[in-house]
Image (spheres, helix red, strand yellow):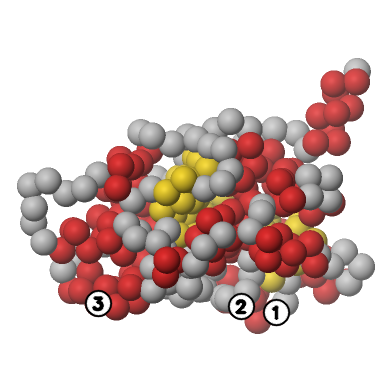
Amino acid sequence: MRRVVFNQKGGVGKSSIACNLAAISAARGKRTLVVDLDPQGNSTHYLMGRPATELDNNAADLLEQTLTFTVFNRRPEESFVHTTPFENLWVLPSSPELEFLERKLEAKHKIYKLREALKKLDQHFDDIYIDTAPALNFYTRSALIGAQRCLIPFDCDDFARQALYSIIHEIRELQEDHNPELSIEGIVANQFQARASLPAKLLAELEQEGLPVLSVRLSSSVKMKESHQCHQPLIHMAPRHPLTQQFEDLYRLLHGEPPAAEAALTAQE
């Protein structure tokens, strides 16, 4: 399955969600790949423990080779995928060069080249998670055209709500014009504050409007920042932490499994 985590708003947890869901997938024994298309390279740094500037053979190199015709282009699974310190988890790293490459790719109408690469990578990985920049640019459009599912992280405030309608409209246009295989898998409430009334009110109103708000809420926690600092997804750094359990419940929800507590009760019966 190819999932893209996308929101035009920054600071909503795209990289955290993509990397932690991927880490859970890998911990379950699935061959899992994170594709980092954000020039900032947060997912790359998080999982590799090294900044994207230190890694060659990255997403920019993969896309740059599409600009000139050669008989023997390097294969993505062989030349551009890097192992991480975590079993079953790989990264196709970002690069700051993506910013400089974008205009050339647009000018040459290479919007479908990422989809071609992702379909080749599909043959080697069970799950692919795509992290995107906080912008609707060439790379995020390429990711939405190449993905099968889209997760939308949502920061529970009114500004984010207004932006959400625009995001959904853009995704539906891309569905209709370029990728009928794509579906919005759900809206993920991130940094959720259960004791505050506004977040719950906003989510309830979105549900009443028929939007696909997921039932799992990811709470705000300093543990997430600690996870970034030590370059370890929560499943490895703090497997019993409540936020880790929420990520696991989100993973289960996306795969049609019952939440961990419900599964444990079923097992006891």
Q: Is 183 drawn above or below residue 157 in the view shown?
A: above
Which circle marks residue 103 in the picture? 3
Q: CA distance from mark 1 to mark 3?
A: 33 Å
Q: Is residue 61 or residue 201 the one in the foreground?
A: 61
User: Are circles 1 and 3 on residues that touch, CB within 8 Å?
Assistant: no
**Secondary structure state at the residue bearing disc 2:** helix
Q: Amino acid at mark 3?
A: Arg
Tell me what residue is drawn at x 57 percent, y 38 percent: 87
Q: Amino acid at mark 1?
A: Asp
Quadrant location, the C terminus: top right
Q: Earlier in the sequence, mark 1 or mark 3?
A: 3
Residue marked by disc 2: 162
Tell me what residue is drawn at x 46 percent, y 45 percent: 83
User: Are circles 2 and 1 on residues that touch, CB within 8 Å?
Assistant: yes
Residue marked by disc 1: 158
Q: Give the number of callouts.
A: 3
Q: Is 100 drawn above or below residue 211 in the view shown?
A: below
Using the rendered view, name the quadrant where residue 151 is placed.
bottom right
Direction from residue 249 to residue 111 in the image, left or right: left
Q: CA distance from mark 3 to mark 2?
A: 29 Å
Residue 211, given in percent of the width and then of the height, sits at 63, 58
Tell me what residue is drawn at x 39 percent, y 68 percent: 95
How busy is the neighbourhood of tag 2: few (under 14 within 10 Å), some, or many (20 plus)?
Answer: few
Direction from residue 86 to residue 55 in the image, left or right: left
Q: CA distance from mark 2 to mark 1?
A: 6 Å
Q: Is residue 29 or residue 136 the one in the foreground?
A: 29
